[in-house]
């Protein structure tokens, strides 16, 4: 049996944890299966960040000579114009089709809302190719939606998405909002949760981080530069940073005996990914704070297992990144989720956890210091009320295991046919 995993996002510690959780569990459950993970136009360092070392797991990276990948743009163009047959003119697609032919199952890796808010046409194209070849597609632990219909391209994207959602051999959705949308559209699915809950191996703190934290207690803060997101186009990165500096300063003031650990979720941003986020963005916040000596920014090369171990020792976490919340739930630590996307709201709703919608502040109107201060005060007040959530961690792992068990049941029945 051969699984070919496609559409694995990179440069993100959350996606790395979801990948590791799923691939480790799949590999251990099917030790005699061949598991291939397909990338194209990625650098080897990006693939290495994701790599799970097991005897039956292989990583394939179709190279490109240029970082600005022309075939990628052509794939998007043909799909947007409603001309998927033109995909076959691209040498890359011929290589992908060959790999598809050799696989028993095409697995769409756990990840974000490419089939929805981000309208990822390449995502649709690669799945469309598998459908065109009559392959069995397993769409595992993803989020979907929303599907706007304001433009002809929105409507075409939704049409392609609906065709795929109704074609998938196995569909599991990881959050309550996506699940509610699927019910509304009449699409059958298996409810699950993020696949990071499927497998976790703790790793020790890096030496430098341990030295900087010392014997101090600490909280974890995971900002998000947000201006890259389609819901925050009214604001600049500087606008967003001013808010994070204000929140950081209030936390330093409110908790004078705690240090702040910042854990970058994005990797290589500011290097070969041209977005001001992650490590450098966090360092700017630290530099502009009232007490930079009390803030430790974890270097970005350290993976999700280390981040989860750091969170497991924290007093609490405030996170505006989806997987920072997932890590807190998994480690049973108190947290405040500053939701910016429905996948975050969907998980907290599923577990019955209170959260804060950061879009209440960044609602498209001009920011002012008074509004930001009120929002920050609300977050500070919540830090005094949040409690440990060990039961939520247990429930999340139970849901993840139930979702994976549904997959194994499907595969067992499918192989009998």
Image: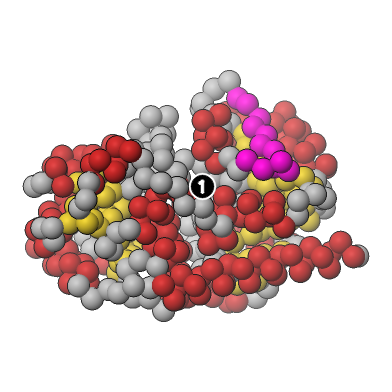
Residue that mark 1 sits on: 16
Residue at the extreme right = 417
Q: Which residue is rendered at x = 90% and y = 65% of the image?
A: 416
270 relative to 197 in the view: left or right: left
Identify the image quadrant of residue 28.
bottom right
- Asked whether the viewer can see residue 77, the reply is no
Which quadrant of the figure contains the C terminus?
bottom right
From this viewpoint, which residue is outermost toward the top? 65
> Which residue occupies 44% across, 74% down?
392
Q: Which residue is pictured at 41% across the width and 72% down the height?
A: 390
* Residue 57 magenta: yes
Q: Which of the 4 quarters of the picture holds residue 198? A: bottom right
Q: Position of 316 compared to 417: left or right?
A: left
Q: In which quarter of the image is residue 85?
A: top right
Q: Nearer the viewer, residue 216 or 124?
A: 216
| Front one among 193 and 20 | 20
- Asked if residue 293 shows in the view, the reply is yes
Estimate the x, y position of residue 2 in percent, counting from the top left: 79, 47
x and y, in percent, of residue 388 in the image: 34, 72
Question: What residue is drawn where x is 33% and y is 58%?
Answer: 313
The spot of residue 318 in percent (x, y) is: 28, 61
Q: In this view, does 247 lie above or below 273?
A: below
| 131 in magenta | no
Residue 16 locus on image (x, y percent) = 51, 47
Please provide the residue range marked out in magenta.
53-64
Task: Decide which of 161, 300 is in the foreground and name it.
Answer: 300
Structural crowding at the residue carrying mark 1, measured as other residues with C-alpha within 10 Å and reported as few (<14), some (14–19) or many (≥20) = many
């Amino acid at each position: 049996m051969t699984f070919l995993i496609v559409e694995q996002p990179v440069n993100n510690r959350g996606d790395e944890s979801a990948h590791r959780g799923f691939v480790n569990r799949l590999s251990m459950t099917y030790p005699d299966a061949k598991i291939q993970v397909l990338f194209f136009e990625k650098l080897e360092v990006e693939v290495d960040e994701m790599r799970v070392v097991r005897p039956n797991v292989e990583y394939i990276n179709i190279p490109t000579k240029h970082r600005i990948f022309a075939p990628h743009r052509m794939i998007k163009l043909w799909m947007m114009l409603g001309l998927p047959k033109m995909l076959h003119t691209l040498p890359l697609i011929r290589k992908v089709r060959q790999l598809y032919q050799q696989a028993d199952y095409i697995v769409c890796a756990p990840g974000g809302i490419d089939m929805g808010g981000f309208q990822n046409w390449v995502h649709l194209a690669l799945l469309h190719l598998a459908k065109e070849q009559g392959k069995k597609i397993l769409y595992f632990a993803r989020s979907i939606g929303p599907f706007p219909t304001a433009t002809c391209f929105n409507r075409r994207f939704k049409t392609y998405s609906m065709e795929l959602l109704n074609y998938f051999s196995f569909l599991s959705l990881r959050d309550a909002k996506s699940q509610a949308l699927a019910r509304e559209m009449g699409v059958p699915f298996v409810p699950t949760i993020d696949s990071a809950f499927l497998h976790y191996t703790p790793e020790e703190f890096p030496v430098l981080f341990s030295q900087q934290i010392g014997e101090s207690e600490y909280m974890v803060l995971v900002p998000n530069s947000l201006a890259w997101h389609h819901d925050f186009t009214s604001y600049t990165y500087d606008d967003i940073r001013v808010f994070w500096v204000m929140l950081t300063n209030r936390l330093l003031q409110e908790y004078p005996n705690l240090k702040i650990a910042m854990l970058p979720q994005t990797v290589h941003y500011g290097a070969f990914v041209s977005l001001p986020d992650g490590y450098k963005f966090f360092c700017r916040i630290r530099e502009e704070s009232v007490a930079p000596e009390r803030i430790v920014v974890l270097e970005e090369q350290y993976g999700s297992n280390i981040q989860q171990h750091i969170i497991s020792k924290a007093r609490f976490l405030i996170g505006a990144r989806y997987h920072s919340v997932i890590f807190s739930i998994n480690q049973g630590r108190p947290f405040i989720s500053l939701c910016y996307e429905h996948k975050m709201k969907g998980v907290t709703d599923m577990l019955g956890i209170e959260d804060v919608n950061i879009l209440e502040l960044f609602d498209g109107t001009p920011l002012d210091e008074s509004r930001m201060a009120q929002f920050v005060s609300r977050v500070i007040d919540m830090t005094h009320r949040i409690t440990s959530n060990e039961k939520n961690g247990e429930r999340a792992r139970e849901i993840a295991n139930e979702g994976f068990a549904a997959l194994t049941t499907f595969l067992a029945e499918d192989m009998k046919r």
